Image (spheres, rainbow, N blue to C red):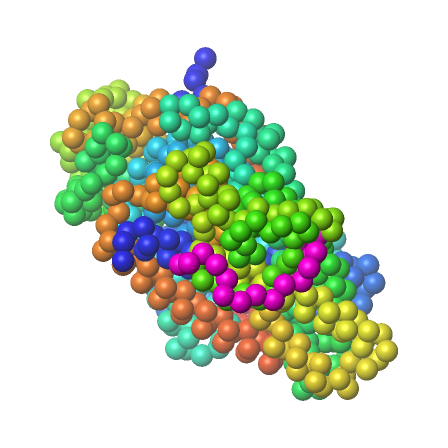
Amino acid sequence: MSELFLARLQFGSTTIFHFLFVPLSIGLVFLVAVMETLYVVKGDDMYKRMAKFWGHLFLINFAVGVVTGIIQEFQFGMNWSEYSRFVGDVFGAPLAIEALLAFFMESTFIGLWIFGWDRLSKKLHLMCIWLVSLGTLMSALWILAANSFMQEPVGFVIRNGRAEMNDFFALLTNPQLFVEFPHVIFGALATGAFFIGGVSAYKILRKQEVAFFKKSFNIAMIVAFISGMGVAFSGHAQAKHLMESQPMKMAASEALWEDSGDPAAWTAFALVDSTNQENAFEINIPYALSYLAYEEFSGEVPGMKTLQKEYEEKYGEGNYIPPVKTTFWSFRIMVGAGMLMIFTSFLGLLLNFYKKLEYSRFYLKGMVWLISFPFIANSAGWIMTEIGRQPWTVFGMMTTSASVSPNVSKASLLFSFLSFTAIYTVLAVLLVYLFVREIKKGSEHTAHVDKEVAVDPFDQGAYL
Amino acid sequence: MIALNELWFILVAVLFVGFFFLEGFDFGVGMASRFLGRNELERRIMVNTIGPFWDANEVWLLTGGGAIFAAFPHWYATMFSGYYIPFVFVLLALIGRGVAFEFRGKVDTPKWIKSWDWVVFGGSIMPPFLFGVLFTSILRGMPIDEQMNIHAKFSDYVNVYTVLGGITVTMLCFLHGLVFLTLKTVGDLQERARELARKMIYGVLVSLVAFVGLSNFETDLFSNRGVVSVLLVGLIVLSYLLAIVFLKKQRDGWAFGMTGAGIALTVSTIFAALFPRVMISSIDAAYNLTVYNASSGNYSLKVMTIVALTLLPFVLGYQIWSYYVFRKRVDGKDMIY
């Protein structure tokens, strides 16, 4: 194991772990805000209980998302110091702005929301949760602006061997950001929605608080269906954009070794043989890749061998083909999971509309399992995006092997990797344990607990 | 006119002053919960005094880190890679502490709560100690080579001077937290917090004096910026002397102001002593990282200045509002954690 390998392993695993919680937080807080809005507008106490119950689950998740995010901000410097030196001028700014604009907002207003039920007016309290939601969206915007720079560097000049920012506006209007941001946000909303949908399905199956969870389910499925469609459309836009910005990633995600020919067929399944640079077996759907790439039923897509030659001329000797199997299959897992989610959310809306939801036990059981799907899709999507960009950290400018800290030893890396893995494993176990506990107790309990703490066990009547 | 990289040095200093002032007291409360709480309820009250605030306080650190990254990429790269293992421990502590607040009240068994209380304690005592070690060793100088990379031995991180620095910062935070508790609690608990704070101040003063004394030999604190350093150190001592008086008179708000001023001035002293360097090389002064050779380009700094100066008033505004909303003392009612 080399230092580079360990640094990559640590960055990959901590980032994937962090990004299990982030989309769930973004999605849940949005849905909780919607529920509390319904409470304030309609005055129905059920919506308040709803906001509190799902809010409890959100908070458990949010805490883990926040603390695992601290590592993210520090490890660019810790593990990727050469990268930080080279692009800090451009890349650091969105990170700093993210903290200043989004983290302060989230953390302050979440405190006000948790502790403010009885101290703030209904409307002020509602404003707090919407500001938390806005904060999570801002946070996503800035970190994705930073990531978009890695996919498609814009707004900089090379001076003294470093990338220096010369156009802030270009960073914000990076075409990559315009396709990446909606894709991630819709994905996050779908994640929150499927979580609520799946948990509600579980409670309905057990015939606990059926009215409450049917309502939750319905709200969730509306959001799930809309955002599922949003994910698909923005994903398609992203694929189209990929043809211009990173054709190599596109070719790798299609396991396309040679040029496709015109029109290009889409490969649904392939036995990829990376050593001989060919596919032993494939199932093709004619025309489909042309459509994916150009929105037309004609047009050739360049293969990896062609691109490799092009890149060698442009960037010099080297292997510019990313790990093909990983890119190919992560793309298919993401798309498959996404399709299934759109279909099941639509089915859920139908079943609810025709008042058949409670009796569709098979469907409800399926929805409980489907909780895992958005997480799989999110992870697969990021694996495809980041692995598919290899060997680059910043496309066309800096390779991953040149980015790593030269002064961090193997022993240090091994120590950090093992300790982060250990603490994350503990966190994951505790989180699932707490989720299951809270879910089993149900919404009556959360309302009850909040009342209990308001009863005074220690009244001494002395205030400021 | 002040250059933008100098302005950003000041802004980074301000962010770290804000971090130690704010998170300082919630670290302190975390430490105090172990010593001061006689039972579960008291410990719970203490954790709840910082409940609505600790998360936002910690963001000062994240923003400080982000600001260093954006304004001084070389500083960020050198410091975070050079202090790799200390930062791993800081991260583990902050992770444990963060979830401990959220998780401790979720299951109602003594064993569960007790375990999390230990995590709160460990997670609150480790970061200030490690940051103390970090800043004092930066001031003392680290083996930074021509490529701006630190290749340090264990004794560069841990030696008498840096450990004393760590202990001093930890004590400053502990005291600050105790005084915060006198502001936010009632009755017996408040009395005990005040009593312990009063004793602690003498410890803090001894440790500070020892630290400043050693600094005279280990660093160029006084030779580099003599008048300013003497003045700042004088003000620090004065703050803590005044804190003794205010605590005696039970003017807790004023006492809190003084322990806060003590922390703010201590952090300012370190930053003032560093300037214009941000990392000192013990190998050769030519390898020092300074605000001039470690900073981002002028364009980037200009953008960041505009963004920061626009946003900071809002951030301060709503943070102050949140402290206003939760100005009441925590007495066992309305506890969430």
Q: Give the x, y percent position of residue B15.
A: 44, 36
- In the depicted structure, whether residue A445 falls above or below residue B164: below
Figure quadrant of residue B223: top left
> Does residue A251 appear anywhere in the picture?
yes
Q: Give the x, y percent position of residue A227.
A: 71, 58
Magenta stretch encompasses residue A117: no
Q: Is residue B176 left or right of residue A266?
A: left
Q: Is residue B272 left or right of residue B19?
A: left
- Foreground of the two, A267 or B173: A267
Q: Give the x, y percent position of residue B205.
A: 24, 41
- In the depicted structure, whether residue A358 falls above or below residue A56: below
> Does residue B245 appear anywhere in the picture?
no
User: Number of labelled discs?
Assistant: 0
- Foreground of the two, B26 or A459: B26
Look at 84% across and 80% down and name the residue there: A355
Look at 53% across and 51% down and name the residue there: A258
Q: Give the x, y percent position of residue B94.
A: 39, 55
The region drawn magenta spans A275-291
Look at 61% across and 66% down and name the residue there: A283
- In the depicted structure, whether residue A270 falls above or below residue A122: below
